[in-house]
Amino acid sequence: MRIDVHFTPVGLSAGDLNGRGVVVIDVLRATTTVITALANGAKAVIPAASSEEAVRLTSNLEKDGVLLAGERKSLKIEGFALGNSPREMTPEVVAGKTIVLATTNGTPALVAAQGGDPVLVGAAANITALAKRAREVLEARSELVIICAGRERQFAVEDAYTAGRLVKVVKKGLGKVDLNDSAAAALALTAAYDGWADAFVDSDAARQLDQADLGADVAFCAKPNRFGTVPQYAERRIT
Ligand code: MLT
């Protein structure tokens, strides 16, 4: 069995993931937002690689029941109904809705992971349920690919820490599981921090969110196991 971690989606091309079991992580905040929206009753989340693509996708859908969401530099994009805050995704706002979401790193990473089967969406918010599902995938397929969204095409500590936590739980008790160097490094990183809030102290993304007065989102994203939902991305939509 084998687990590969990618600290960013850079370099992954369309065919690389065909038929492979994949987990995508952007814990601050896109994958936390997706998990929260679906746990709170959204019908689907459609990730877009850019805000322009989100607008295009939305105009192809029936307007009723579609919400355009996304951020630039952490803040809601002008004219969009919602930003990228998991705290906005309340049942009152999202139940029964399809959300088209465009974020800086998270949704492009999801779009890059298309072709994986399954593509699971992960964060602290669903870590235990995610690990259970990811382990089933590893046992069935003998391999698992974990893709961190990273930040501006670079390593991001919060995603790497989440990946390490996942590797640790998924491989527990399985005997020999081969890890690529990034998976081994992510695993080592889990020993350096005492949970997500501690890892976020070293996170540029968390600092940017704090500076944008979004510290409450950072705290929201730091709490593990808010939900038992493990969203899956297939046929261009996450459900
Ligand atoms: C991203 O996609 O880079 C993040 O989700 C940005 C954010 O937290 O708004």
Image: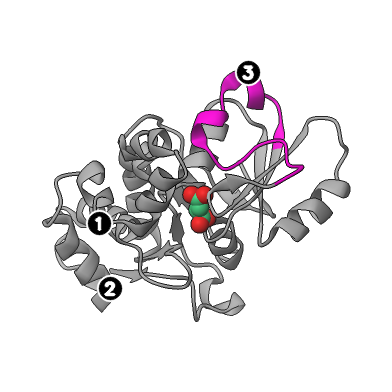
Residue 181 drawn above or below residue 127: below
Residue 142 drawn above or below residue 201: below
At horizontal 48% and vertical 69% (from top left) the residue drawn is: 152
At horizontal 66% and vertical 37% (from top left) the residue drawn is: 82
Q: Amino acid at mark 3?
A: Glu
Callout 1: 10 Å neighbours few (<14), some, many (20+)? some
Q: Amino acid at mark 1?
A: Asp
Q: Quadrant of residue 171?
A: bottom left
Q: Quadrant of residue 51?
A: bottom right
Q: Nearer the viewer, residue 106 or 209?
A: 209
Rendered location of residue 226, percent (x, y): 37, 29
Q: Is residue 222 magenta?
A: no
Quick check: marks 3 and 2 in contact, CB under 8 Å? no
Residue 1 drawn above or below residue 198: below
Q: Amino acid at mark 2?
A: Ser
Rendered location of residue 225, percent (x, y): 33, 33
Identify the residue position indicated by label 1 in the image: 202
